[in-house]
C-alpha cells in the first residue's frame, strides 16, 4: 500500500510479480490519499488476508474509483512458493481463483491444458492448427514436450512412453493427428519411445468466469480469465473452452476460443 500511495511503480510491479511497465502506468496517476487496515485474517501458514479501506482522491482508471472503498488484499511470504500479493480486489468483486478454490474436474482439465500449452492456444475447433510447423525445430520440440507432459496427467505412462501411445492419446484427448514424434528431439528410435527433459508444472494466475454443463451432450462450456499479475488485478486474457465428458469420465477438448487478449505477457510460476 505504501508503494501504491507513493506511486512507486517499480515496487508495485515487484509485489504484483509483473514487469510490464506500460500496462500498469495508469497507477502513477492514482492519488491514494490514505489507507487503513480494517480486518486481518490468517488464511493458513504464511498466507494472510486483509480488508483495507482506500481513500482515493484522484484516478485515471475505472479500476480505482474516486472515493472511499473497501478492498481485499491477499499476501503470501516468498517461502510459500509464489510470495507476494496474491489478491487485490474490491470486496464486492467475486473471483473464483483456479488454484486457490476447489474446481470441477473439467475446469481442472482446461486449466492444465492452458497452462502447459498456452503459447500455442488459439481460436480453433480443429486443434491440429495449434501444432507448430515441423520445420521450425525449437517451437515444434517445445510443443511436443508440453503435449506429452499434459497427456501424462491424463493416462500416459510417466516414463518410457511409447510414441504410438502419445499419438493415440493426442487424438483421443485433443483430436490432434498431425504430429510426427519421430521428428521430436527426445524420440528414442531403438525403443520407439519418447522422453521429456522437464516434469515441472507451470501455473498462471487465473479465475473461473463461468461453467455451463449440458447433460444431453455431456459438454461443458467453460470460460477462464488469466491475469497479468499475481494479484488478479489486470486481466490479460479470456479463453473459452468446450469440453466433452466421455463415458469413462475422461475428457476431450472440442474447441478453444480467445475472447480477449491484452497483448501483455502472462506471468507464471514453476512448481
Image (cartoon, rainbow, N blue to C red):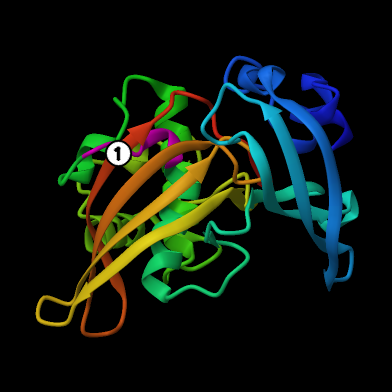
Crowd around label 1: few <14 · some 14–19 · many ≥20 (10 Å):
some
Which residue does the image show at 61% across and 53% down from the upper left?
A: 201
| Magenta residues, start to end | 118-123
Examine the image and state in which quarter residue 8 appears. top right
Q: Nearer the viewer, residue 193 or 87?
A: 87
Which residue does the image show at 71% across and 34% down from the upper left?
A: 56
What is the total number of numbered labels drawn onto the structure image? 1
Examine the image and state in which quarter residue 26 appears. top right
- Quarter of the figure with the N terminus: top right
Q: Name the spot of residue 76 as percent of width and height, x first.
A: 83, 55
Disc 1 on helix, strand or loop? strand
Q: Is residue 188 left or right of residue 251?
A: right
Q: Which residue is mark 1?
A: 258
Examine the image and state in which quarter residue 189 appears. top left
Q: Check the image and report above or below for 142 versus 195.
A: above
Q: Nearer the viewer, residue 3 or 139?
A: 3
Q: Check the image and report above or below for 216 versus 271.
A: below
Amino acid at each position: 500500500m505504501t508503494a501504491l500511495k507513493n506511486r512507486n511503480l517499480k515496487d508495485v510491479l515487484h509485489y504484483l510479480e509483473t514487469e510490464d511497465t506500460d500496462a500498469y502506468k495508469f497507477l502513477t496517476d492514482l492519488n491514494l490519499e490514505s489507507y487503513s487496515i480494517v480486518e486481518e485474517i490468517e488464511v493458513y501458514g504464511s498466507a494472510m488476508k486483509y480488508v483495507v479501506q482506500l481513500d482515493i482522491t484522484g484516478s485515471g482508471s475505472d479500476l480505482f474509483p474516486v472515493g472511499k472503498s473497501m478492498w481485499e488484499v491477499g499476501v503470501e511470504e516468498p517461502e510459500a512458493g509464489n510470495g507476494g500479493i496474491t489478491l487485490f480486489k474490491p470486496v464486492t468483486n467475486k473471483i473464483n481463483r483456479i488454484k486457490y478454490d476447489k474446481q470441477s474436474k473439467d475446469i481442472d482439465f482446461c486449466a492444465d491444458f492452458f497452462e502447459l500449452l498456452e503459447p500455442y492456444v488459439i481460436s480453433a475447433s480443429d486443434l491440429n492448427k495449434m501444432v507448430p510447423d515441423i520445420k521450425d525445430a525449437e517451437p515444434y520440440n517445445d510443443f511436443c514436450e508440453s503435449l506429452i507432459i499434459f497427456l501424462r496427467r491424463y493416462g500416459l505412462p510417466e516414463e518410457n512412453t511409447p510414441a504410438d501411445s502419445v499419438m493415440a492419446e493426442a487424438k483421443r484427448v485433443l483430436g490432434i493427428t498431425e504430429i510426427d514424434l519421430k521428428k521430436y528431439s527426445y524420440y528414442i528410435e531403438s525403443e520407439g519411445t519418447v522422453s521429456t527433459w522437464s516434469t515441472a508444472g507451470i501455473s498462471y494466475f487465473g479465475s473461473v468466469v463461468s461453467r455451463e454443463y449440458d447433460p444431453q451432450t455431456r459438454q461443458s462450456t467453460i470460460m477462464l480469465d488469466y491475469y497479468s499479475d499475481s494479484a488478479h488485478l489486470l486481466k490479460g486474457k479470456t479463453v473459452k473452452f468446450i469440453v466433452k465428458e466421455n463415458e469413462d469420465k475422461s475428457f476431450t477438448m472440442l474447441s478453444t476460443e480467445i475472447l480477449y487478449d491484452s497483448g501483455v505477457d502472462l506471468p507464471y510460476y514453476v512448481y
